[in-house]
């Protein structure tokens, strides 16, 4: 399968990055350098330019200290056509353009990149909200309808909560109708997607060298068939607490490794492996949905992983059409390597190319000796 290709990334006033345009070949690009060099910032900028997405809530954080606005631009090849995606960031404001035309977030191609980072372990060890966010973000990228209904559902929950807090019991039947309609659609969508997602995650977990089976399941606070009844039954409690206590905003994506709940029992490295499996499943689902492989961004490839799992991760990077891999040490086998230092990225000759040259020289010398002998 072919993939999205990030030809180049330009940044201006983005965090600590020096203004620059970096070009990326097909295959693996390695970025290495000391702590604080800007490696994570580079991947974050690439992810933002490719997808329009960021999980930073205060956009000002992304703007270089002392500046007012920041800008990132991706020149990419997707489905055989070239396009330019630009993101401008100002105070609490994000402006997106594709080929010079302003677009809304939902209009950017949604399958262009997957970002893997050490913080993904929080998906495993953290509270349900993180796992829900993973699932919701993925399903929103797979389906614009899901994104829309989820946004409506979330708005309904917060308005309904406000009504509960003001004790508007009379208004509840109307709120319940809307909530049940939207919530049911979300539950059904999640259930459908989970079948394929758990297959892919289980496969990925095995491919990453784990001998324990990974099982994904939804832990639901209610069901499509009983949602309306469950809400009615907890009316008094809801009015007392001033919040909506049942529905898909309370559900969890439970992860079981070798028969034990991973959140409580998995080791750190096992947890990171599960997180990797979730990201790999995300990559595969996006590829199935959009017909091309996303660019794979891997931050800190060696963090928390034993040598075998690190090798699996590098294998994964090598198996997709394009990947950018950062670390405090060089990623072996990269087509291009950048050395990161103080927000700047300097390409260096791939060590492999140097070795080849050295080998060629030795061979040439031997040949010369044979001729002379
Ligand atoms: N808005 C900003 N303006 C200026 N500098 C910033 C801004 N946001 C973050 N930085 C700085 O960017 C630097 C690089 O951060 P980054 O996380 O990219 O480093 P890194 O190379 O990934 O390091 P590590 O190996 O520790 O993960 C940090 O020192 C941070 O202080
Ligand atoms: Mg980092």
Image (cartoon, rainbow, N blue to C red):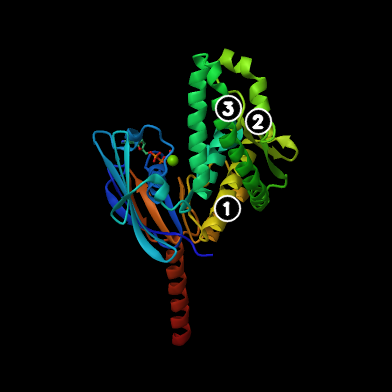
Local SS, label 1: helix
Mark closer to the chain start, 1 or 2: 2
Q: Nearer the viewer, residue 185 or 296?
A: 185
**Foreground mark, 2 or 3?**
3
The residue positioned farthest toward the right in the image shown: 259
Q: Quadrant of the N terminus?
A: bottom right
Q: Is mark 2 within 8 Å of ligand 2?
A: no
Local SS, label 2: helix
Q: Nearer the viewer, residue 172 or 348?
A: 172
Residue 250 x, y percent position in the rendering: 60, 29
Residue 107 x, y percent position in the rendering: 40, 50
Tell me how far mark 1 sits from mark 3, CA to CA: 33 Å
Local SS, label 3: helix
Q: Nearer the viewer, residue 97 or 152?
A: 152
In the rendered view, tell whether residue 72 sits above or below residue 365. above
**Foreground mark, 1 or 2?**
2
Residue 143 x, y percent position in the rendering: 52, 48
Mark closer to the chain start, 2 or 3: 3
Residue 298 x, y percent position in the rendering: 49, 48
Is any part of residue 117 visible from this angle? Answer: no
The residue positioned farthest toward the left in the image shown: 67
Q: Residue at x 64, y 40 (%)?
A: 270
Tell me how far mark 1 sits from mark 2, CA to CA: 29 Å
Which numbered disc covers residue 176?
A: 3
Q: Are marks 1 and 2 in contact (CB under 8 Å)?
A: no
Is 190 left, or right, of 373 in this rendering? Answer: right
Q: Residue at x 48, y 36 (%)?
A: 151
Q: Residue at x 32, y 33 (%)?
A: 92
Which numbered disc covers residue 285?
A: 1
Tell me how far mark 2 sits from mark 3, CA to CA: 9 Å
The residue labelled by disc 2 is 227
């Amino acid at each position: 399968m072919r993939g999205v290709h990030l030809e180049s990334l330009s940044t201006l006033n983005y965090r600590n990055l020096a203004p620059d345009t970096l070009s990326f070949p097909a295959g693996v690009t390695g970025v290495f350098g000391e702590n604080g060099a800007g490696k994570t910032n580079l991947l974050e900028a690439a992810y933002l330019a490719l997808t329009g997405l960021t999980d930073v809530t205060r956009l000002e954080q992304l703007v270089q200290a002392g500046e007012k606005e920041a800008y990132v631009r991706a020149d990419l090849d997707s489905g055989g056509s070239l396009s330019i995606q630009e993101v401008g960031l100002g105070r609490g404001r994000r402006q997106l353009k594709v080929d010079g035309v302003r677009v809304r977030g939902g209009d950017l191609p949604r399958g262009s990149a997957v970002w893997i980072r050490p913080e993904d372990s929080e998906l495993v060890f953290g509270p349900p909200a993180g796992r829900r966010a993973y699932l919701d973000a993925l399903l929103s990228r797979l389906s614009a309808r899901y994104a829309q209904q989820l946004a409506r559902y979330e708005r309904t929950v917060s308005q309904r909560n406000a009504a509960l807090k003001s004790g508007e019991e009379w208004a509840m039947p109307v709120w319940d109708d809307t909530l049940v309609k939207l919530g049911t659609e979300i539950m059904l969508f999640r259930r459908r997607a989970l079948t394929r997602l758990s297959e892919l995650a289980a496969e990925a977990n095995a491919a990453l060298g784990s001998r324990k089976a990974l099982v994904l399941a939804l832990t639901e606070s209610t069901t499509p068939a009983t949602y309306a009844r469950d809400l009615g039954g907890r009316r008094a409690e809801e009015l007392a607490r001033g919040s909506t206590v049942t529905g898909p905003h309370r559900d969890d994506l439970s992860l079981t490794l070798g028969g034990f709940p991973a959140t409580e029992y998995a080791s750190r490295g096992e947890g990171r492996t599960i997180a990797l499996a979730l990201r790999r499943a995300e990559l595969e689902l996006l590829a199935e949905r959009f017909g091309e492989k996303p660019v794979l961004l891997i931050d800190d490839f060696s963090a928390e992983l034993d040598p075998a799992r690190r090798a699996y991760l590098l294998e994964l990077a090598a198996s997709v059409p394009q990947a950018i891999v950062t670390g405090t040490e060089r990623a072996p086998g990269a087509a291009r390597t950048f050395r990161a230092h103080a927000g700047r990225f300097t390409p260096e000759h791939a060590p492999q190319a140097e070795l080849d040259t050295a080998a060629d020289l030795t061979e040439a010398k031997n040949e010369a000796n044979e001729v002379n002998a």
